[in-house]
């Protein structure tokens, strides 16, 4: 009983407050237990505890105990004195309720028990870790299947046209140099003939004729040197044109050379890269989840198949995503609606790896594309519509959400 008194200058008043405890309560209200452990619960009613034991000693209660103990779900055992025993095998983390019900008033109080299953251990975990390393080894296949670095078809064509123009210019320049050499040769022949003629006649013009012949020889040497340089430039331009033509031929060729399988079709090579990149992205997700759960000692054997199938899920989603991009259903900066030779392998591999890594987001995006392409109002006329609760449940199933999924 509590008295509340209000007092003024000349008058005062009071009220009485009666505090009554809960009709019944359970101690402790929440506990975490592991296999083979036990916990003594005590129910407290308005008159006092129902058993002589107040802690976890497990002393028997009086025969006239006014409390009924209820275990839900029936995992483990709970006796009439409130002693709960955990079973030896807990397949998964489970929450159970220990309820004390008053026989006199019918009031109930509940305590929550979290049963912590032991982490998965043994050879199975080791095999799963080895499997993750094998999945990572796919990165070497990606490297060996990587297409050679080649320019785009338009760039290769432009380079070839420029090389042809350069060769034409070098050929014309060589022709001019050969004409200059021919002229210098004719001038030298004339000068030598004049020098010989003046030498026989013993005239005073002999010195001048010899000088002309010397100058003509010097001009001829200069012209020959220029023609030699022009010829070398022309040969270099011809080789460069041949190289540019070979590059253009490789760019337009549907097959490419790889380190792993040699010659392979470009489209098939890109498909392999997409599939392997999807696996690699899934590996990044799996390895992070696996290391976190191993470190926290909370990994469960029930999720083994999730880890084993995750790379195949990532590959499949990457392939679907790639075909949707190539088909023009989605606009992403990877060269949609382009030939294989115009696609950037870095963009293709990057998008595929991200799809494998974030499969849930990729699935939602594909769902949006599907809804946009195949949108219909037919569902509005359907009879026996689902209730909102059913819709929510089905939506959870369709997105694949699940409590306890080993994702981070």
Image (tube, rainbow, N blue to C red):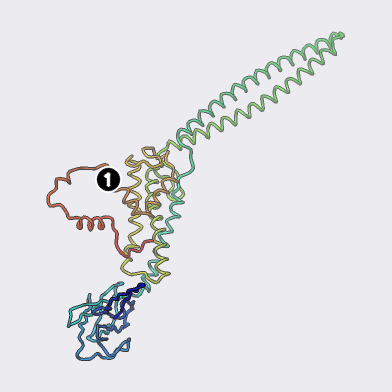
Instruction: Give me the residue at 37% from left, 54% from top.
Output: 358
Q: Is residue 35 left or right of residue 226?
A: left
Viewer-closest of 157 and 13: 13
Q: Quadrant of residue 220?
A: top right
Pick the quarter of the image with the N terminus. bottom left
Q: Is residue 161 left or right of residue 264?
A: right
The percent position of residue 345, horizontal first and vertical second, equals: 43, 45
- The residue pinned by badge 1 equals 370
Give the tally of numbered discs. 1
Instruction: Give me the residue at 20% from left, 78% from top.
Output: 107
Viewer-closest of 61 and 93: 61
274 up-or-down from 177: above or below: below
Instruction: Give me the residue at 42% from left, 56% from top.
Output: 138
The percent position of residue 37, horizontal first and vertical second, equals: 32, 82
Viewer-closest of 398 and 190: 398
287 up-or-down from 123: above or below: above
SS of the residue under disc 1: helix
Estimate how packed mark 1 is, as few (under 14), some (14 to 19) or many (20 or more) residues with alpha carbons within 10 Å: few
The percent position of residue 63, horizontal first and vertical second, equals: 20, 91
Viewer-closest of 74 and 238: 74
Name the residue at the front extreme. 10
Q: Quadrant of residue 17?
A: bottom left
Instruction: Give me the residue at 29% from left, 46% from top.
Output: 368
Pick the quarter of the image with the C terminus. bottom left
The percent position of residue 121, horizontal first and vertical second, equals: 37, 73
């Amino acid at each position: 009983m509590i008295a509340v008194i209000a007092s003024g200058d000349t008058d005062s008043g009071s009220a009485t407050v009666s505090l009554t405890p809960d009709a019944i309560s359970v101690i402790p209200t929440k506990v975490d237990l592991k296999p083979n452990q036990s916990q003594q619960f005590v129910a407290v009613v308005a008159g006092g505890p129902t058993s002589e034991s107040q802690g976890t000693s497990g002393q028997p209660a009086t025969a006239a105990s006014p409390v009924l103990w209820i275990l839900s779900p029936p995992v483990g055992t709970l006796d009439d004195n409130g002693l709960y025993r955990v079973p030896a095998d807990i397949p998964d983390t489970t929450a159970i309720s220990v309820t004390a019900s008053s026989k006199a008033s019918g009031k109930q109080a509940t305590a929550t028990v979290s049963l912590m299953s032991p982490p998965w251990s043994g050879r199975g975990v080791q095999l799963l870790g080895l499997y993750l390393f094998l999945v990572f080894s796919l990165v070497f296949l990606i490297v060996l299947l990587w297409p050679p670095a080649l320019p785009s078809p338009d760039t290769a064509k432009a380079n070839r046209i420029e090389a042809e123009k350069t060769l034409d210019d070098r050929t014309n320049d060589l022709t001019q140099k050969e004409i200059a050499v021919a002229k210098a040769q004719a001038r030298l022949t004339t000068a030598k003939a004049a020098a010989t003629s003046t030498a026989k006649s013993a005239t005073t013009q002999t010195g001048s004729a010899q000088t002309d012949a010397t100058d003509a020889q010097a001009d001829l040497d200069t012209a020959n040197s220029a023609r030699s340089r022009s010829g070398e430039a022309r040969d270099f331009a011809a080789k460069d044109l041949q190289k540019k033509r070979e590059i253009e031929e490789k760019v337009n060729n549907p097959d490419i050379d790889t380190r792993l399988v040699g010659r392979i079709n470009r489209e098939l090579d890109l498909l392999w890269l997409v599939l392997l990149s999807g696996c690699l992205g899934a590996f990044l997700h799996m390895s992070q989840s696996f290391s976190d759960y191993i470190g926290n000692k909370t990994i469960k054997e029930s999720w083994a198949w999730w880890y084993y199938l995750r790379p195949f899920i990532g590959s499949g989603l990457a392939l679907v995503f790639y075909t949707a991009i190539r088909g023009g259903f989605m606009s992403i900066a990877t060269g949609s609606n382009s030939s294989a030779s115009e696609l950037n392998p870095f963009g293709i591999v990057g998008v595929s790896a991200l799809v494998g890594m974030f499969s849930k987001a990729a699935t939602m995006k594909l769902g949006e594309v599907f809804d946009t392409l195949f949108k219909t109002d037919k569902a509005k006329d359907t009879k026996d519509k689902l209730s909102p609760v059913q819709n929510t449940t089905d939506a959870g199933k369709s997105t694949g959400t699940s409590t306890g999924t080993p994702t981070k």
